[in-house]
Image: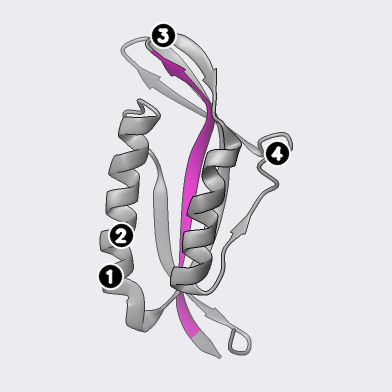
Amino acid sequence: MANYVKVEIFIPVEYKKEGKPISANLDEFEPLLNKLNKKYGGCTTHNIHDNPPYTGYYYDKRGIVVDTLTSVVVLVKKTQVSEAIKYFKKLKENFEQKFEQDFVLITYHSIQTIGTL
C-alpha cells in the first residue's frame, strides 16, 4: 500500500461576472492540467468539455445561489504535502478572484492505494 493525500478542486464552469452569466473558457484549464501532471505525476478530471457533473447550491445575501462545477483530482505523495497545500492555497485564491467567487472548494484528505502509482 502507498500513502497519498487526495486533493480535489471544484472548478466553476458557469458563474456570474458583474451579475452576468459566464461560461468558463474550458481551454484555459489545459495549462493547469499540464502543470498538475508535471508537478504531481498526474491528475484526473471529468470530461471538461461535456456536461458538468456537479451543481452546487448555497445561501447568501442574494438567496439561493447555484454553481455549475467540474472537478480535478490529484494524488500527492506524503513527502509533497506541505508544498502542495501552499500551492493549492494560492490556486484557490487565484480562482476566487478570476471567477469572482466568494469561495472555491478545494478539499484534501489522506488515502491509501493498493499498490504504488
Residue 91 among magenta residues = no
Please say whether residue 78 is visible from this viewpoint. yes
The label on residue 19 is: 3
Measure the C-alpha gap from mark 4 to mark 3: 24 Å
Measure the C-alpha gap from mark 2 to mark 4: 25 Å
The answer to whether 95 is drawn above or below residue 66 in the figure is below
The secondary structure type at the circle numbered 4 is: loop
Viewer-proximal residue among 108 and 28: 28
Query: Which residue lies at the image location 28% right of the left edge and 70% below the top edge?
Result: 83
> Sequence order check: which comes first, mark 2 or mark 3?
3
Query: Do the residues bearing badges 1 and 4 touch, measured as CB atoms within 8 Å?
Result: no
The label on residue 49 is: 4
Alpha-carbon neighbours of circle 4 within 10 Å: few (<14), some, or many (≥20)? few
Query: Which residue lies at the image location 36% right of the left edge and 28% below the top edge?
Result: 101
> Sequence order check: which comes first, mark 4 or mark 3?
3
The secondary structure type at the circle numbered 1 is: helix
Q: Main secondary structure of the magenta part?
A: strand
The range drawn in magenta is 3-17
Query: Which residue lies under the disc numbered 2?
Result: 87
Query: Which residue lies under the disc numbered 1?
Result: 83
Alpha-carbon neighbours of circle 1 within 10 Å: few (<14), some, or many (≥20)? few
Measure the C-alpha gap from mark 1 to mark 4: 30 Å
Q: Amino acid at mark 1?
A: Glu
Image coordinates of residue 51 in percent, x first then y, are 72, 34
